[in-house]
């Protein structure tokens, strides 16, 4: 298995901070709760935790804090596609997320619901973090000192920022977004005057947005106590300054924003954190995942369809390479995790299992066997199984050693059944092109299975050898022979290793499948 080195490399970048400070090293992750949290949000927490574990390994006495920050005072710019009755939210466009009713009807606000979903998912993995709400930080006065510093350095920050935007937007630009005291919107207001001496500003609610109109109100308000918010790039710098953040990750689409926020943090009198840029996640079609659209794999789906460690293992790969993820490749991701549990040790700090175990204590150590998510999925689909307990019985029949990790494999069986019921049985599959020139050999393969001695007691590799008899005897292309078998038996061009798969099914089920495949194929040619 490849070594996991990038968290250790990041820990080395924090060496000076670790050696020269008796205060905790502050790590931060941030997200906007404008829709259901997705894998990108979780990934920042997981990957940052890996760096923390590597740092603690290098410097056992170091103290750390991880802040998970929700920008829930941000305004709703568009309707999220992955919430029910999203048209009902149209009247709240332009308002802070924490001021909008929960569309699910379970919590006081839209932001509360989304924040709760994220925290439940993080808690299910046992992450150690402090949750911070933007709304609470502004309203409680935590950000007041930083906001005053923004006002004190208004001219310098404005000059720096407007150099990054188009000329037509420069005149109206201000770092502050007042919340209209009349209509409650945040994106409809425009600052028309600032008074640095008493930290107030005057605004006009006259800015139309996509899907919402201003109310025309004019007012004067203080910049403290949650009456205004700063734009998110300045907000990012504000957090670094107020919390003393030492380290943060960000996606490659925020390169220029990170650079600008670092400069603003310095203007405020803070020291910008050590930053790490990562590549973005893509869905199975290569599109960037989005919390508003809900593509990729949702966090609820990860919990339902995959063992918890599968997602952590997926995120251990080099963050500087774009990762494709989606329901079609979830079995592959789950099997990569199972493979780690088979092969790796918790003693080697460069191993995936060491990192997984550092986050989730007592990771299972699996005995060597050929059971996999993909194999069990194919078994369940081809036998029409909808009961996880029955699928577990088949798995145990093939390899009785799994009883040593019974709870793990029972959970895998539950994941598999949920996955095929919710996804595999509903998705449209591409039509297969089958090479029926191999059909005459299928009847002879049936005879081989019928005549095999003690088939029920054969190991997977022994059954695999039976599959090879035909291509070796007739000098056939082995890859084409297997592709033919997968096509007529499983309805796909590839699948699990046939030996273990057929072994789990047993002779009776195997012969039934083969004879059915022969009859249906003969009728097609």
Image: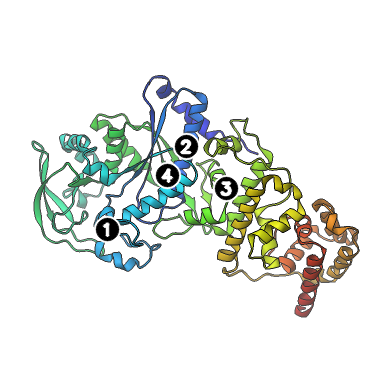
Image coords of residue 9 (percent x, y): 51, 30
At 37% from the left edge and 53% from the top edge, which residue is drawn? 114
Name the residue carrying label 3: 310
Which type of secondary structure does the marked residue at label 3 adopt?
Answer: helix
Image coords of residue 366 (percent x, y): 68, 43
Contact between marks 4 and 3 (CB within 8 A): the answer is no
**128 vs 462, nearest the viewer:** 128
Decide: is 4 above or below 210. Answer: above
* Name of the residue lying farthest toward the top: 20
Q: Which comes sooner in the sequence, label 2 or label 1?
A: 2
Name the residue carrying label 4: 252
Q: Which comes sooner in the sequence, label 3 or label 1?
A: 1
Name the residue carrying label 1: 100
Q: Which comes sooner in the sequence, label 4 or label 2?
A: 2
Name the residue carrying label 2: 49
Contact between marks 3 and 1 (CB within 8 A): the answer is no
**289 vs 370, nearest the viewer:** 370
At 64% from the left edge and 71% from the top edge, which residue is drawn? 431
Which type of secondary structure does the marked residue at label 2 adopt?
Answer: helix
Image coords of residue 407 (percent x, y): 63, 49
Contact between marks 4 and 2 (CB within 8 A): the answer is no
For the residue carrying disc 2, how many other residues have a C-alpha within 10 Å: few (<14), some (14-19), or many (20+)?
Answer: many
Say which quarter of the image contains residue 475. bottom right
Report, in whole angstroms, how far the alpha carbon at label 3 lies from the one at label 2: 16 Å
Report, in whole angstroms, how far the alpha carbon at label 4 lies from the one at label 3: 24 Å
Q: Nearer the viewer, mark 4 or mark 2?
A: 2
């Amino acid at each position: 298995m490849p070594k996991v080195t990038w968290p250790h490399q990041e820990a080395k970048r924090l060496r000076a901070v670790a050696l020269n400070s008796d205060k905790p090293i502050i790590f931060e992750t941030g997200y906007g709760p404008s829709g259901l949290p997705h894998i990108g949000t979780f990934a920042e927490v997981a990957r940052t935790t890996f760096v923390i574990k590597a740092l603690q390994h290098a410097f056992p006495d170091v103290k750390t804090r991880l802040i998970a920050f929700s920008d829930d005072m941000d305004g709703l710019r568009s309707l999220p596609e992955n919430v029910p009755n999203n048209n009902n939210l149209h009247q709240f466009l332009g308002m802070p997320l924490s001021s909008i009713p929960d569309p699910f009807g379970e919590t006081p606000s839209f932001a509360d619901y989304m924040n709760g979903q994220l925290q439940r998912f993080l808690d299910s993995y046992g992450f150690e973090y402090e949750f911070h709400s933007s709304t609470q930080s502004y309203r409680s006065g935590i950000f007041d000192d930083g906001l005053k510093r923004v006002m004190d350095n208004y001219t310098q920050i404005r000059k720096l920022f407007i150099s990054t935007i188009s000329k037509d937007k420069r005149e109206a630009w201000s770092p502050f977004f007042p919340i209209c005291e009349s209509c409650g919107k945040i994106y409809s207001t425009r600052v028309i005057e600032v008074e640095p001496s008493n930290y107030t500003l005057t605004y006009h609610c006259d800015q139309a947005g996509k899907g919402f109109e201003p109310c025309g109100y004019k007012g004067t308000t203080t910049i403290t106590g949650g009456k205004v918010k700063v734009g998110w790039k300045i907000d990012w710098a504000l957090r670094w300054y107020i919390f003393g953040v030492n380290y943060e990750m960000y996606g490659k689409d925020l390169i220029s924003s990170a650079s600008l926020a670092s400069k603003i943090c310095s203007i405020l009198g803070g020291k910008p954190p050590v930053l790490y840029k990562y590549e973005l996640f893509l869905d199975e079609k290569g599109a960037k995942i989005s919390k508003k659209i809900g593509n990729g794999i949702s966090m609820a789906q990860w919990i339902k369809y995959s063992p918890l460690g599968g997602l952590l293992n997926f995120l251990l790969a080099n963050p500087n390479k774009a990762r494709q993820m989606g329901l079609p490749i979830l079995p592959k991701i789950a099997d990569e995790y199972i493979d780690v549990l088979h092969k790796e040790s918790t003693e080697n700090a460069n191993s995936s299992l060491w990192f997984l175990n550092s986050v989730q204590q007592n990771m299972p150590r699996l005995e060597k066997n050929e059971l996999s998510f993909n194999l069990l999925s194919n078994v369940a689909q081809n036998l029409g199984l909808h009961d996880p307990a029955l699928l577990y019985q088949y798995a145990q029949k093939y390899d009785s050693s799994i009883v040593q990790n019974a709870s793990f494999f029972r959970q895998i069986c539950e994941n598999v059944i949920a996955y095929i019921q919710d996804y595999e049985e509903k998705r449209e599959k591409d039509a297969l092109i089958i090479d029926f020139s191999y059909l005459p050999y299928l009847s002879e393969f049936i005879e081989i299975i019928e005549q095999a001695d003690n088939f029920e007691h054969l190991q997977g590799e022994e059954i695999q050898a039976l599959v090879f008899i035909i291509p070796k005897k007739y000098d056939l292309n082995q890859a084409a022979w297997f592709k033919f078998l997968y096509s007529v038996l499983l309805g796909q061009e590839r699948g699990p290793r046939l030996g273990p798969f057929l072994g789990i099914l047993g002779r009776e089920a195997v012969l039934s499948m083969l004879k059915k495949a022969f009859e249906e194929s003969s009728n097609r040619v």
